[in-house]
Amino acid sequence: MANRPLSPHLQIWKWGPHMLTSILHRVSGNGMAFVGLPLLVWWLAALASGPAAYERFAAVANSPLGWVVLVGLSWAFFNHLASGLRHFVLDIGAGYELTTNKTWSVGVQLLGILLTAAFWAALLLR
């Protein structure tokens, strides 16, 4: 076996908010792809199939599990959006200073939660 240095593993790196933000960016993107897309297709098919099919969709969406899925998908969207904007800023070469990166990482998580809460407040309180 070649005598090469190995890449550092998770035991070497100190856990930080930027790592959480990166992981949640991937999780939220996959969640939208693997849960959101089939849900969107089901909703569109129910709309096209008539009132009975739409009533079935609406019954599932208005169940407690449906609410959890819908709130989770909206959080995934807003979190992925905020994290994507952070990545855009990083791609142009700004924000790599450690304190700035950590601050923006925490801000992304808070912004995702706040936008989700504001979205659902606007829907439910209208």
Image (spheres, rainbow, N blue to C red):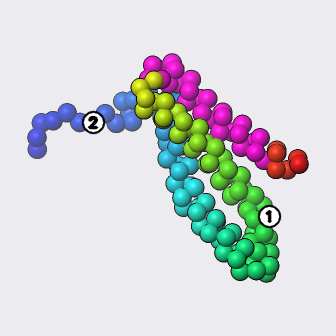
Q: What SS does tag 2 mark? A: loop
Q: Amino acid at mark 1?
A: Asn
Query: Tag 2: Cα neighbours inside 10 Å, few (<14), some, or many (≥20)?
Result: few
* Drawn side of residue 104 relative to residue 74, left or right: left
> Residue at image x 58%, y 63%?
37
Q: What SS does tag 1 mark? A: loop
Q: Please tell me whether mark 1 or mark 2 is closer to you in this view.
A: 1
Residue 63 in the image: x percent, y percent? 79, 65
Instruction: State the residue lying farthest toward the right.
Output: 126
Query: In 3D space, how far apart are the residues under numbered discs 1 and 2 (Cα atoms)?
Result: 48 Å
Residue 6, by quadrant, is top left
Relative to 30, say whether 57 is above or below. Answer: below
Residue 20: tell me if it is visible.
no
Q: In the picture, which quadrant includes the N terminus?
A: top left
User: In the rendered image, which residue does mark 2 sit on?
Assistant: 7
Dot 1 or dot 2, earlier in sequence: 2
Q: How many marks?
A: 2
Q: Amino acid at mark 2?
A: Ser
Relative to 3, say whether 54 is above or below. Answer: below
Residue 83 in the image: x percent, y percent? 55, 38
Residue 74: tell me if it is visible.
yes
> Residue at image x 56%, y 27%?
104
Is 111 inside the magenta-drawn segment?
Answer: yes
- Which label was assigned to residue 31? none
Q: Where are the magenta residues, as a range?
A: 95-120
User: In the rendered image, which residue does mark 1 sit on?
Assistant: 62
Residue 23 in the image: x percent, y percent? 49, 42
* Drawn side of residue 62 relative to residue 8, left or right: right
